[in-house]
Image: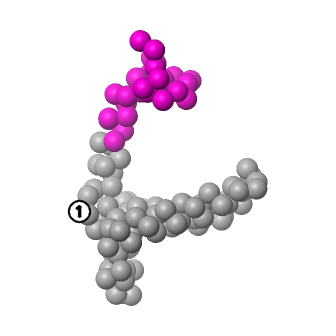
Amino acid sequence: MAKDEVLRELREFVRERDWAQFHSPENLAKSISIEAGELLECFQWNANADRSEVQDELADVLTYCFLLADTLGLDSDQVVLDKLARTREKYPVEKAKGRSTKYDAYED
């Protein structure tokens, strides 16, 4: 399923229920955080979390992320690609490969 189709389905789902009135950027950002907490909860006491629960919570996080991008008139794919380009500059392969050190702690 293409991203455009997913977005179309999400918009239809929201429209059918008249939920757009509740989807301010602030509310959607809060919902992302709440759902991310629920995703993390899947791993709270067990590194081998139930895959189906993880899938459901990840879907909730992604759904709110897509809706927030759409509400703000942003292309979610482009937002990710733009950020990836900036992150590539901060973490060049020759300095970052195999390391978890933050970019500002690299030694020249």
Residue 84: tell me if it is visible.
Answer: yes
Report whether 77 appears left or right of 37.
left
| Front one among 11 and 104 | 104
Q: Residues within 10 Å of mark 1 (few under 14, many from 20)?
A: few
The image shows residue 100, relative to residue 3, as above or below, that is above
Q: Position of residue 55 (x, y in %)?
A: 60, 62
The quadrant in which the C terminus is found is top left
Residue occupying the point 26% across, 58% down: 74
For the view shown, which residue lies furthest in the top direction?
108
Instruction: Label 1, secondary structure: give it.
Output: loop
Return the residue at label 1: 73
Residue occupying the point 29% across, 42% down: 82
Report whether 30 appears left or right of 68.
right
Residue occupying the point 32% across, 73% down: 24
Report whether 44 appears left or right of 107.
right
The image shows residue 48, relative to residue 61, as above or below, that is above
What span is in magenta?
83-108
Report whether 84 appears left or right of 40.
left
Residue 56, located in which quarter of the rendered image? bottom right
At label 1, which amino acid type do we have? Gly
Q: Position of residue 42 (x, y in %)?
A: 67, 60
> How has the structure been colored for display?
one colour
The image shows a total of numbered marks equal to 1
Residue 39, located in which quarter of the rendered image? bottom right
Residue occupying the point 35% across, 47% down: 80
